[in-house]
Image (cartoon, rainbow, N blue to C red):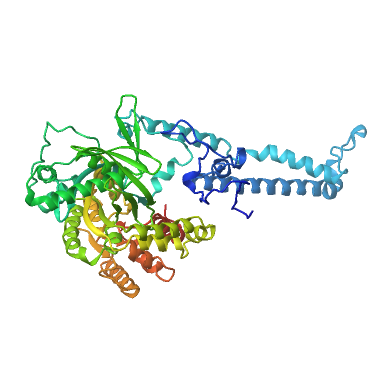
Amino acid sequence: MRVGNMDVTVDGQAWPREPLSIKNVLLRGCTLRNTDWVYALVLNTGSDTKIMQSASSAPTKWSDVMITLNKCIGILCIGLVVLCSVAATVFVTWQNQIAREAWYLHGTIAANKVVLETTGDAVQTWFIMCFYYFLLLYQVIPISLYVSLTTVKFLQAMFMAWDLKMYHAESDTPAIVRTMALNEELGQISYIFSDKTGTLTCNVMDFRKCSINGVSYGSGLTEIGRAALKRAGQPIPPEPQADPTVKSIPYVNFVDPALDAAMRRDGDDSIALQRQKCHQFFEHLAVCHTVIPEKLDSGEIRLSASSPDEQALVAGAQYMGYTFESRSVGKAMLDVAGVGKKSYEILEVLEFNSTRKRMSVVVRLPTNELMLYTKGADMMIYARLHPSSKALEAITSQHMEQYADDGLRTLALAVKSLDESWFATWSAKYRAASGSIDELDKRKHGQPNAIDTLMEEMESDLTLIGATAIEDKLQRGVPECLSSLSAALIKVWMLTGDKEETAINIGYACALLDNAIVQVVINMDNCPTADAIRDKLAAAADAFHAKQGQDRYALVIDGEALEVALKPDMKHDLLGLAQHCVAVICCRVSPAQKAEMVMLIRDHLPEAR
């Protein structure tokens, strides 16, 4: 046994070695879904569980007012102790050295010759007099000030809860003040770092448009597209209406009769190739995902997904006739309109993460054909395409740029036909690498490893089939809110994983950007080297200072350029411009880069809030 790793063997049993990952772990607090029972080995209980190990007392937060008050009280306490000590020392000195010589303290009556005792234990007298003087002077410490401040903060919290402008009528939820200690900090905020999905937007995805084999399908404008037309002074066309005879499906807002005609199995033979590509496209959407269908008591199937994007894509496939019905170990069952139920064998799943930015499944089709289905960010898919897909890549890129201009979230889809013998060899290597503790440790720490190498080998020479576009609507009142924050001189930084065009258009729709703001756009296309990035940052900062801050600036930077700009020798160049911008938009950034941007301000601008 090694620390952190454990090999378990059973005598007389020849079982294959299978690595245990987070997918095989049920943490405390989990709920079983889609199964009534599981066999499990209890590894940790009680205080050894992850939730208990991670549990800690909430950190104590103090506002600047309370910190200043505590310092003042501390100084007053020290001053009070010093005053009492000095006064007691003076009294003992006077009593034992001066009072005994003072003739006026001696009485004139023989029975009472001494008016004041001038001798005794000096130490005992010193402590007694300290206590006396403390009783005389303790009022210099304003203890009641704490009570007054707490009362004021309680009343502030009540007014916040009663504020109708912070009341959410749909869920009947008022503003909730969970702690009163930081009320006044709200008025000192100078920077707001915001994600886009779920913060500026509703985090409710709708399948809106798609590009299949070079043909774009889907009509209508998004909120961001309408805002772009309004900003350009162009007329806004009416929104197309869906066919009332077609049953609506949640998470789908798609209207285009042309796609229905292209997918009709008894349609024109002249578009047979396009029909085949359309069916392959939606088959891809219905199979390549990690969604779990849940059958409700009403018989309706609800899609449970870790990502709302996948939920919308599977719903889009269902809308076009490819309904994902159930999932079992290594199997996915689809109900295809006009054909019936079809079973797909899922042989391998190469899951999505923030570094790969793509996911793939190896699937055996009902026709016994072995295929790889891959979807992910366009830059990840395009870099792994076969040269024969370059022409289609150019057309699909144009469509994706149009979708991005409308503020839609895009994904590219690709396929690859696999040879049986090659896959058998690859699968053996992949399972061996996945079962190797050493390779798993290397991958965990970001080192070169056989697992990633084999994934790259599988996800190469892909054939592009199209792209999807999903809409995430803005939350109500976002533009007005950001305008108010800007008027209050609060700088808003939007950190998002969207494409540059999408992020900029969302910035306009949110009133984060406008035509009067000077935009500094930095990416690896216009600044391919570190020196070019540094020069552009310095030039923009110099231009800002040359006009003495009369112009408003906004910085738009993508993840690749940001990775260079966040290096230790360039952080000050990035900060030199970013701290003067009214808005900063970071697009195509990873969660780690988002954290680095927050730390950039926190570490180098301690006065920022």
Residue 465: horizontal and vertical position, in percent?
21, 55
Provide residue 58's location: percent of width, then percent of height.
54, 42
Q: Is residue 592 left or right of residue 223?
A: right
- Left or right of residue 219: residue 207: right
Extreme-top residue of the structure: 298
User: Is 296 drawn above or below residue 515 in the view shown?
Assistant: above
In percent of the image, x 86 and y 46: which residue is there? Answer: 100
Residue reaching furthest to the bottom: 531
Q: 123 or 160, which lies in front?
A: 160
Q: Can you tell which quarter of the image residue 401 is in?
A: bottom left
| Residue 177 visible in image | yes
Left/right placement of residue 212 relative to residue 353 reads left
Q: Which image quadrant for residue 203?
A: top left
Furthest residue to the right? 110
Q: Residue 517 at x, y = what percent?
A: 22, 59
* Apparent side of residue 572 relative to residue 381 in the rendered image (left or right): right
Front-most of 141 and 503? 503
Please say whether residue 483 is visible from this viewpoint: no
- Residue 445 vs 58, above or below: the answer is below
Tell how many labels: 0
